[in-house]
Image (cartoon, helix red, strand yellow):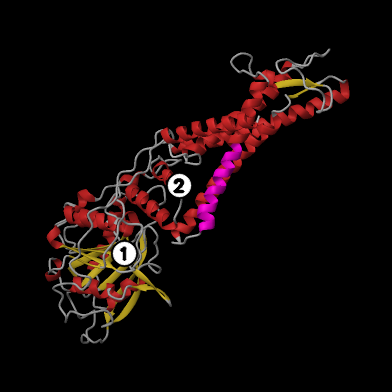
Amino acid sequence: MFFRTVATSAAILVALAVTGAVAGPAWEPEPVTDHLHLATSSTAIGGADPDAGEPGDFEVRETPVTIPLADGREVGGLLREPVGAGDAGGVDADEDAGRPGIVFVHGAGTGKATDAFTLAATALASAGITTLVPDKRLDNYSTRHRDYEQMARDYAWSVRFLREVPGVDPDDVGLYAESEGAWVSPVMMVDDPRLAFQILVSAPIVPPRQQAAYAVDNYLRNTDVPGGVFRAIPRAVGMKVPGGGFEYADFDVRPWLREQEDPILAVFGTNDASMPLEQGTRELLADADADDVTVRFYERANHGINVETPGGLVLHPDFARDVADWVLGLPATASAPPQVAGAQPEQLYLAAPVPQPHWYGDGDWLVGVVVTAGGLLVVGPLLLGGAALAGRVARRRSGRPGVRLARGLRAPLTGLGVGAVATMLGLAAYLGAVARLALDYEKNALVVQGGWIAVRLLGLVAVVAAALLLNRVRDLRMSVADRGPADAVRADPGPPDADPAPPDAVRPEPHRPHRAAVAVVSTGFWATVLGATALLVTLAYWGAYQLGI
């Protein structure tokens, strides 16, 4: 019995491993072998005018503003202007015509002007640049639906507003776009050739789906997850998300970058694990006018170019100075060497098109399978329990036998159903815990390694239960092809420890079991088996049963 159970379990495990391997794409990112060669470790901007001004030269006046949009809509904003006296000499923004202006374009994680870009916008304003941080328009922006071209048209109203601010040169207004905003600002530059320059902060360059897969891969590697977890990346990122939407996931900004003619300053933090730093730089240099592209990498800086200090996160000490030097020094700084400089970035793998899942490419189908399986695992036990209860009641009232599963089926069937559900819930909890660790840049071997072992052990319990059930069915000669599931039940007028009936027949009784009762028990049995099997296949798809196949 033991060896037969082991052999059957092994066969089921191999079958599940093969199913998981062929059901969807593997994840094999290409390593980066040709790294960037930086001219110098200094981020200082070449060609900068030492008398142009630097952060801290001016006091900053903050003014809440209302920015009109199309169709009578409006958004709030925060205007910061350089005023008063400073080390660069006293000027007032209202009297100093010709100052450059910058409109900030939000990334995915920010929306309110009062909360976003506070340090950068204030520092640049104190250097003599008028800055405008608008609220992000949110009525047409959600996780599922966002249109980068429409967002560009919305932000264009902020550009118009800033051009009308006294003291701002309307022909010297540019953009500061962070993260997701770097998919928007190149569209704005093409739509409005009057824009003078563009600052890209932590720009993905590659399409959102590629960037998402790259970021997930990097976060997981930083968290030291087992290799088997990586299989989930293309299957999660590559599928059509349940409920639709996310059309923007394949938005390609490079056609707009190819039309760029104005100067670009691209900056990255070397601690930013979410962006393909080296690859993005190469693609930007290849797509835009390379002569007017300047790239800087800031050591230990994160996605927002902040660095960790004992007092918390602050802007990298050289960042605001460099941006101000570049903006105030244009056009001389646009093409001045060094072009690519700063701390050496380290990108391990390339961001690339995400392979499409084979089976569960449509997330609605995946959800449908899991929900249906869950429903079967609820209905099946209810039918079996209801039939057992009805049998007891009938036996007490009339003495007629009840109908229940043949001996030896109940325990493995219960183990299969409970094991499949427990493994699915365990996998979901594990992935959630790993995601939290990854986003917080933390490591926890107990959660990451121990949790994966626990999930796979739960899955093994379900497989062993399936093996015991299959072997017992064989013993009972319950061949579905020959006789159907009705042979899995028997009439039972006595206690559970009575002598078992012959395996391929119902116990001879004066009263044969009612066909309806047999059908209910058979349906409950197969509903449970099919629901558990669907969950096991789904678990195999997500990598719970990998055997190196």
Q: Which residue is mark 1?
A: 270
Amino acid on which the number 2 mark rests in the picture: Val
Whichever of labels 2 and 1 marks the residue nearer the N terminus, that label is 2
Residue 200 in view of the camera: yes
Query: Gap in Å between the C-alphas at discs 2 and 1?
Result: 25 Å
SS assignment for the magenta stretch, majority: helix
Q: Nearer the viewer, residue 325 or 428?
A: 428
The residue tagged with tag 1: helix, strand or loop? loop
Residue 383 occupies quadrant: top right
Q: Is residue 451 magenta?
A: yes
Q: Is residue 222 above or below residue 13?
A: below
Q: Position of residue 96 (x, y in %)?
A: 19, 79
Left or right of 411 in this view: 251: left
Whether 54 is drawn above or below 494: the answer is: below
Residue located at (43% from left, 77% from top): 310
Nearer the viewer's eye, disc 2 or disc 1? 2
Is residue 475 located in the magenta-colored stretch of the structure? no
Picture quarter with the N terminus:
top right
Q: Are marks 2 and 1 in contact (CB under 8 Å)?
A: no
Residue sitting nearer the eye, 110 or 168: 110
Q: Which residues are magenta?
A: 445-462
Q: What amino acid is labelled 1 in the image?
A: Thr
Q: Residues within 10 Å of mark 1 (few under 14, many from 20)?
A: many
Pick the quarter of the image with the C terminus.
Answer: top left
State the residue position of label 2. 229
Question: Of helix, strand and loop, which one carries label 2?
Answer: helix
